[in-house]
């Protein structure tokens, strides 16, 4: 797992780490049972405060994304689909929120946005159907 | 006692000029504290008082539960200190320095020293004045770490190091000075490195502490909001608690916010503004915000 953090960003470092692990889990790059670096290793690799690395893991553990087995290490949680889809859902919601923010900034109201999305969905559905036929 | 450093009304006056004024500083055990301020703000004076090298004009400093005036000899065993310019003996070799400092301490971790002599590639038989600036700093760090201090105080230690040495220096601190509830007090001008490794930062200006806050909180709460309202700017937003500065340019307002960000955004959204933009601030921008002095070029 390669982490890329930006210390100068407005997002706290522990959240940046958390988001990257969640994205990796949602995309399947990290699978249940995969081992993560220890807090110490992670802190050293990123040259960050060990407290920050620990905080990132604590948050992820609270959300059920990872589990820590004493004496063995930290692993991606051995989760059933609901948990997996929870991470996916979060990612999707995040992207939808960004879309809504963009739309609001363009002075679109939510109904107009909904119509736009509906139209795109219909187009996509048509495309998918056509592909299904060939 | 969960504080590594606690000062109460700490003051140092040179003649009539106050260098440090009524400083109340608290540093949690097990944290990395970034101590920031422009040159001449009183950082080094503060550090010297913490070390018991300067007697405060007024106030007290308690370190690891011990008073810096009464117990400063006991504290020497518990504190590691890397000064701004490594104070080495030019005619002593690396090994002689290590032997000398070892003899002053009750405990000394030979394994740690040897490991880093290796990693830093420090020539044991070379005299200190023949070492590069970077190597002198690395040696000073080893001399401060050998007795495994409970508190490591660093006064602008990475000034003059190249980026590789600087990264190595920070990694050494992370692996050797943050275990077992050890505390690091780091004064630095390299804000990007402080941003990386500090839990909490304190900013000192003209001898006074103008801000102490956890870095994560700084990141999520200290923002600027650029907003264009439909009509005149509503007073209740400009005066909202947490809005610390309002700038105006034509119809566009720039609000500097240091708390209640969510609440303020909701209030702004209710006025149906033409445009809202949230601007993240990095540590450098926050630093300028708090240390700006009238009449200087920076704005």
Image (tube, rainbow, N blue to C red):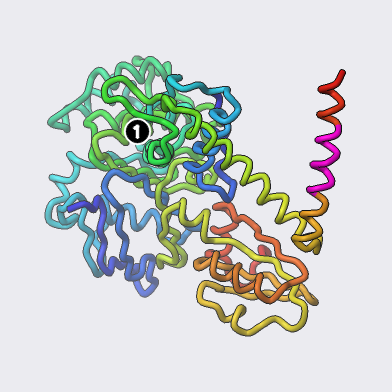
Q: Which secondary structure dominates the residues rendered in magenta? A: helix
Res B138 → quadrant: top left
Res B140 → quadrant: top left
Residue A15 in sight: yes
Task: State the residue at coordinates (46%, 56%).
Answer: B217
Which of the two residues, B244 or B102, is positioned nearer the viewer here? B244
Letter of the chain that mark 1 sits on in the rendering: B
The answer to whether B186 appears left or right of B228 in the picture is left
Which of the two residues, B197 or B118, is positioned nearer the viewer here? B197
- The x, y position of residue B260, in whole percent, is 50, 68
A38 in magenta? no
Task: State the residue at coordinates (55%, 78%).
Answer: B240
- Number of numbered labels in the structure image: 1
Q: Residue furthest front?
A: A133
Magenta stretch? A117-126
Q: Secondary structure at mark 1?
A: loop
Task: State the residue at coordinates (50%, 29%).
Answer: A81
Up the image or down, A105 lies above or below B131; here it is below
> What residue is shown with label 1?
B88
Image quarter (top left, top right, bottom left or bottom right) of the C terminus of chain B:
bottom right
- The x, y position of residue A52, in whole percent, is 41, 40
- The x, y position of residue B40, in whole percent, is 47, 60
Which of the two residues, B203 or B295, is positioned nearer the viewer here? B203
Up the image or down, A78 lies above or below B149; here it is above
A119 in magenta? yes
Task: State the residue at coordinates (59%, 83%).
Answer: B236
Circle 1 Cα neighbour tier, 10 Å, few/some/many (<14 / 14–19 / ≥20): some
């Amino acid at each position: 797992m390669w982490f890329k953090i930006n210390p100068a960003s407005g997002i706290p470092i522990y959240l940046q780490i958390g988001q990257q692990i969640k994205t990796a889990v949602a995309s399947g790059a990290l699978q249940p049972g995969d081992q993560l670096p220890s807090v110490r290793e992670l802190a050293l690799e990123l040259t960050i405060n060990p407290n920050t690395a620990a905080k990132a893991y604590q948050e992820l553990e609270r959300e059920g994304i990872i589990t820590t087995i004493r004496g063995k290490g930290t692993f991606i949680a051995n989760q059933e689909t609901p948990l997996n889809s929870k991470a996916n859902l979060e990612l999707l919601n995040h992207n939808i929120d960004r879309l809504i923010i963009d739309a609001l900034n363009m002075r679109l109201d939510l109904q107009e946005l909904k119509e736009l999305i509906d139209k795109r969905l219909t187009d996509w559905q048509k495309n998918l159907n056509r592909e299904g036929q060939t | 006692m969960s504080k590594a450093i606690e000062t109460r009304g700490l003051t140092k006056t040179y003649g009539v000029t106050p260098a440090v004024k009524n400083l109340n500083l608290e540093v949690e055990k097990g944290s990395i504290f970034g101590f920031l301020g422009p040159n001449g703000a009183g950082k080094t004076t503060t550090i010297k008082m913490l070390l018991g090298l300067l007697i405060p004009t007024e106030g007290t400093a308690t370190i690891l539960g011990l008073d810096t005036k009464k117990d400063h000899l006991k504290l020497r065993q518990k504190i590691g200190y890397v000064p701004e310019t490594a104070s080495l003996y030019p005619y002593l070799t690396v090994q002689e320095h290590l032997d000398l400092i070892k003899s002053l301490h009750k405990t000394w971790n030979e394994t740690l020293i040897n490991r880093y002599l290796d990693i830093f590639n420090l020539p044991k038989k070379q005299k200190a004045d023949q070492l590069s600036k970077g190597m002198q700093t690395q040696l000073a760090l080893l001399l401060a770490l050998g007795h495994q201090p409970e508190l490591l105080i660093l006064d602008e230690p990475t000034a003059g190091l190249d980026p590789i040495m600087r990264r190595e220096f920070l990694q050494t601190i992370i692996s050797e000075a943050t275990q077992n509830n050890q505390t690091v007090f780091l004064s630095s001008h390299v804000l990007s490195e402080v941003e990386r490794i500090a839990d909490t930062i304190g900013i000192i200006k003209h001898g006074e502490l103008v801000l102490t806050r956890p870095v994560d909180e700084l990141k999520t709460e200290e923002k600027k909001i650029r907003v264009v309202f439909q009509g005149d700017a509503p007073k209740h937003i400009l005066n909202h608690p947490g809005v610390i500065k309002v700038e105006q340019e034509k119809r566009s307002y720039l609000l500097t916010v240091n708390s209640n960000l969510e609440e303020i955004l909701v209030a702004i959204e209710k006025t149906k503004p033409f445009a809202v933009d949230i601007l993240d601030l990095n540590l450098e921008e926050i630093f300028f915000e708090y240390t700006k002095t009238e009449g200087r070029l920076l704005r």
